[in-house]
Image (cartoon, rainbow, N blue to C red):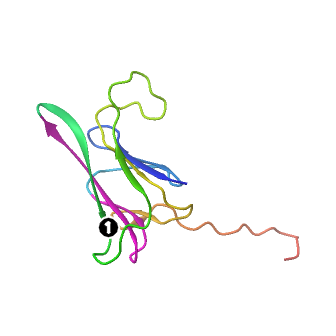
Amino acid sequence: MAIRIYGASDDLVEIEGDVTDEVNPGSSITVGTAAAGVVVKMRYGKRKGAAVWEAVVGQIDEGVPIPWAVTISGLASQGDNRDHPRDYTAIVDIACPPGTPVRHGGKLLNPPQRPQERRGVPA
């Protein structure tokens, strides 16, 4: 499942997909591991008098290419769009596999799920 990252207001960044969370824009979002992945930094600022979100995307390690397709797009004003109602943000889509670690400021947002123990049922 892909991860989508975009600015939601002047002080929130939304993460959707395998992870769904709202984070502050102060720290980078890392998708992947220390060995290979993508770093995304969302910045809010003024451009030509308008407030917009910018996306900065990079690889984690200098010698290791980004392992998945990354798309940066945006929407022109299209009225009510259910997939993304904002027209003032860059949208970053990362085509990573399910379970790919996602961190914000070093905090893991999608810890691995442990299988639930079933009582009374032999393993």
In the depicted view, which residue is nearer to us: 117 or 5? 5
Residue 84 seen from this side: yes
Relative placement, left or right, of 61 versus 1 is: left
Estimate the x, y position of residue 121 in percent, counting from the top left: 88, 71
Spot occupied by residue 58 in the image (x, y as percentages of width and height): 29, 63
Q: Main secondary structure of the magenta part?
A: strand
Q: Which residues are magenta?
A: 27-47
Residue positioned most to the top: 79
Give above or below for 67 relative to 69: below
Q: Is residue 111 above or below residue 79?
A: below
- Total marks shown come to 1
Dot 1 lies on which element? strand
Q: From the image, which quarter does the N terminus lie in?
A: bottom right
Residue at x-position 43% and y-position 58%: 69
Residue located beneath label 1 in the image: 59
Whether residue 13 is visible, yes or no, is no
* Relative side of 122 to 86, left or right: right
Quarter placement of the C terminus: bottom right
Q: Is 35 within the magenta?
A: yes
**Counting other residues with Cα less than 10 Å from the Cα at mark 1, is it few (<14), some (14-19), or many (20 or more)?**
some
Q: In the image, what residue occupies the spot 48% across and 66% down?
A: 101
User: In the rendered structure, which amino acid carries the disc numbered 1?
Assistant: Gln
Residue 114's quadrant in the figure?
bottom right
Is 114 inside the magenta-drawn segment?
no
Considering every residue shown, the one lying at the far left of the view is: 48
How far from the left and from the top, in percent, is residue 47? 14, 37
2 up-or-down from 45: above or below: below
Residue at 28% from the left image edge and 34% from the top image edge: 88
Residue at point 54%, 54% (across, down): 18
Residue 43 to residue 122: above or below: above
Q: Quadrant of residue 57?
A: bottom left
**Residue 117: % across, % down:** 76, 69
